[in-house]
Amino acid sequence: MPAADPATARGVGAIVVAAGQGHRFGASRPKQFVDLCGMPVLAWSVRTLVNHSAVDRVVVVLAPSRVASPPAWLPDGVLVVPGGVFRADSVRAGAAALAGDVETVLVHDGARPFVSAELVSRVVDGARGGPVVPVIAVDDTVKRVDEGGWIEGTVPRDRLRRVQTPQGFPAAVLNRTHALDDAGAWKAQDAAAMTDDALLCERLGIDVSTVEGDPANLKITTARDLALARAMIETGLIAAGN
């Protein structure tokens, strides 16, 4: 598809970040490619985004070694691009692939298979007014501890939230937050700390709003998470067709 004029670009693009190696998962392959009740973990969220009426383009960011022969189960029309060492590098690569074609960009973690169409709609609507992230309340009591593990105090939880993806951004804002620094690249220590794109907005003083998240939108990080995801499907909490 030829690049559009940024001044006239419309529509929504989605970047699915799936270039990580998933070392904490402990399997022989990255967690996003592990089977989840008949489909790879990554395939669940990609399918939801491709089928969503508000999403016009989907870019999947994979490890460079997988780009030459991307998974055959990826839907037609999905663009595959190589990611980088850090998550920020991969998001930047996805944003570059969408440059000029869309006015709104969603960034989603490939390890979150159960993103719902309703959540995508909320984020798309919210992102039309600026950066937005889905959040859920913190139910547990939260303690602050010192380096030795001793409790220093209790943190009030009424204003604490857990952040999910997809996160939504006006394309111009996302591109600004991922602009290279004067040296031509992010400093390694900064890139490693960029665990979500809202953090980049915060560092630049860009306001970020929130929408209601979804407790079922879990992130698979460990084998225990995968077992929980399978149980959610097998008990009917998540429909097999998502």
Image (tube, rainbow, N blue to C red):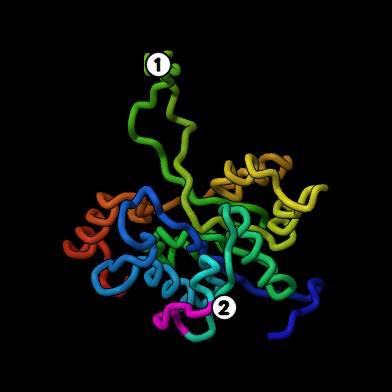
User: Measured along the vertical axis of the image, is residue 225 above or below residue 19?
Assistant: above
- Please tell me whether residue 104 belongs to the stretch shown in magenta: no
State the CA–CA distance, disc 1 to disc 2: 47 Å
**Viewer-proximal residue, 118 or 29?**
29
**Viewer-proximal residue, 105 or 85?**
85
Q: Residue at the location (58% across, 41% down)? A: 193
Please name the residue that numbered disc 1 is placed on: 148
User: Measured along the vertical axis of the image, is residue 181 above or below residue 157?
Assistant: below
Q: Amino acid at mark 1?
A: Gly
Give the numbered dot on residue 89. none
Q: Amino acid at mark 2?
A: Leu
Where is residue 240 shown, x and y percent of the image?
26, 72
Q: Residue at the location (63% across, 46% down)? A: 191
- Please tell me whether residue 71 belongs to the stretch shown in magenta: yes
Where is residue 177 shown, x and y percent of the image?
71, 51
Q: Residue at the location (42% across, 19% down)? A: 145
User: Measured along the vertical axis of the image, is residue 43 above or below residue 73?
Assistant: above
- Mark nearer the N terminus (1 vs 2): 2
Where is residue 111 shown, x and y percent of the image?
41, 59
**Over which residues does the magenta segment extend?**
68-75
Q: Residues within 10 Å of mark 2 (few under 14, many from 20)?
A: some
Secondary structure beneath dot 1 equals: loop
Please name the residue that numbered disc 2 is placed on: 79
- Quadrant where the image shows the N terminus: bottom right
Can residue 69 be seen? yes
Give the main secondary structure, helix, strand or loop, of the magenta stretch: loop
- Quadrant where the image shows the C terminus: bottom left
Q: Residues within 10 Å of mark 1 (few under 14, many from 20)?
A: few
Secondary structure beneath dot 2 equals: strand
Q: Residue at the location (31% across, 73% down)? A: 39
